[in-house]
Image: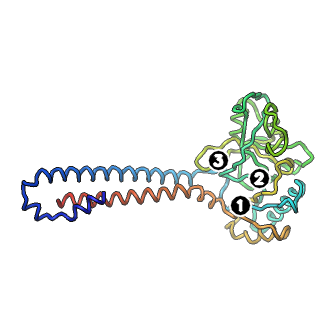
Amino acid sequence: GLAPALKATAVDLIDILKQGNRTGTSSRATQRVRNILVVTEMAMALMLILVAGLFVQSIARLERQGLGIREARLLKAHFYMPPARYPDPAAITRFSDEFAARVRRLPGVIDATVTTIYPPTNGWSQLLDLPDHPVTRIQDVASAEFGVTDAHFLKAMGISLLRGRDFADSDMPTTQPVALVSQEFSRRYFPNRDPIGQQVHIGPPKFLQIGDGATTADNIDVTIVGVMNDFRNRGLADSPDPQIIGLYSQQPIVNYGFKDIVVRTASEPRLLVPQITNQLHALDPDMPLAEVQTFDEIVQRQVGDKRFTTILLSSFAIGGLVLIARGWRIRAQV
């Protein structure tokens, strides 16, 4: 659209008037081409404005929707326990529990949990073997988002317990492993009965003949003791997948050294980062507290790509409108 506009600015209007009817046919043809260009530019600019408007609505919807947790004053940070210093699941459990307990005692901390789960992205999908759900094909095998945590997860994250009970101090490494499942898990896999008390095998079904080791994430039977509210575990744009949560103290196979601590505070969460870091270094001076983010920042990062696309489309749309205005002005002059 810019080339015809620049060409038109170089036209000598007095010369055209002197030529009179001799250029009438040519002028009418040029005018038709110019009109077509202006109309095309207008249509494209309006399309870009419409798409940009839809993106703005999409971003606003993503930012307004709930994650299924209480997001206010929530901080997440990552820490890693190397195998050289923490060689077994028992050592990992002791360190994680002590770190969380120290953070919970800090002034201004409402609660804290050590976990591998944090909305809106979980990213750990696990095969399951469900009771009374016999399958013989891989595509029919049940699966859910999976993670391990401590007994403070629901309270710290602000997730509602709908039925049954929460994790308790009586759930020890030596007792029957227990699990919490989401409402979507209950709807999908136990539509006609109460999941409380049901046993679920976390791991591939037996017909796949996959043994313990590096090829499987876990291989343990857990008893469902509670149903919690759904929370976002596949990003902001997608509905939640079924979720199952266990205690890392009861599931040594998946009690790895990488963990996150999630802290709910009474005031601005970042003000407590130095104190949280001090508690970590009191246990292990060489362990860094990494990837520190508030949950508001996590949400903003999720919508960042869409916001950039929206700005880009809006810029093109504004540029198109400028060209349209220029084209109509030249058309009126000619």
Q: Amino acid at mark 2?
A: Phe
Judging from the image, the colouring scheme is rainbow
Q: Quadrant of the N terminus?
A: bottom left
Query: Residue 71, percent across and down?
Result: 65, 57
Q: Secondary structure at mark 3?
A: loop
Q: Kindly report the distance in space between the C-alpha atoms of the residues bearing marks 2 and 3.
A: 19 Å
Residue drawn at (7%, 62%), measured in percent from left and top? 18
Q: Quadrant of the C terminus?
A: bottom left
Residue occupied by mark 1: 76
Residue occupied by mark 2: 153
Residue occupied by mark 3: 234
Q: In the picture shown, does residue 242 fall above or below 263?
A: above
Q: Is residue 166 left or right of residue 230?
A: right
Q: Kindly report the distance in space between the C-alpha atoms of the residues bearing marks 1 and 2.
A: 13 Å
Q: First in sequence: mark 2 or mark 3?
A: 2
Q: Which mark is residue 313?
A: none
Q: Amino acid at mark 1?
A: Lys
Q: Is residue 239 left or right of residue 191?
A: left
Query: Residue 120, percent across and down?
Result: 65, 52
Query: Residue 17, percent across and down?
Result: 9, 61
Q: Secondary structure at mark 2?
A: helix
Select label 2 or label 3 by which is in front. Answer: 3
- Using the image as rendered, state which of residue 206 and residue 202 is in the foreground: 206
Residue drawn at (89%, 55%), measured in percent from left and top? 88
Q: In the picture shown, does residue 81 fall above or below 247?
A: below
Asked which quadrant contains residue 2, the reply is bottom left
Q: Is residue 63 left or right of residue 83?
A: left
Q: Secondary structure at mark 1?
A: strand
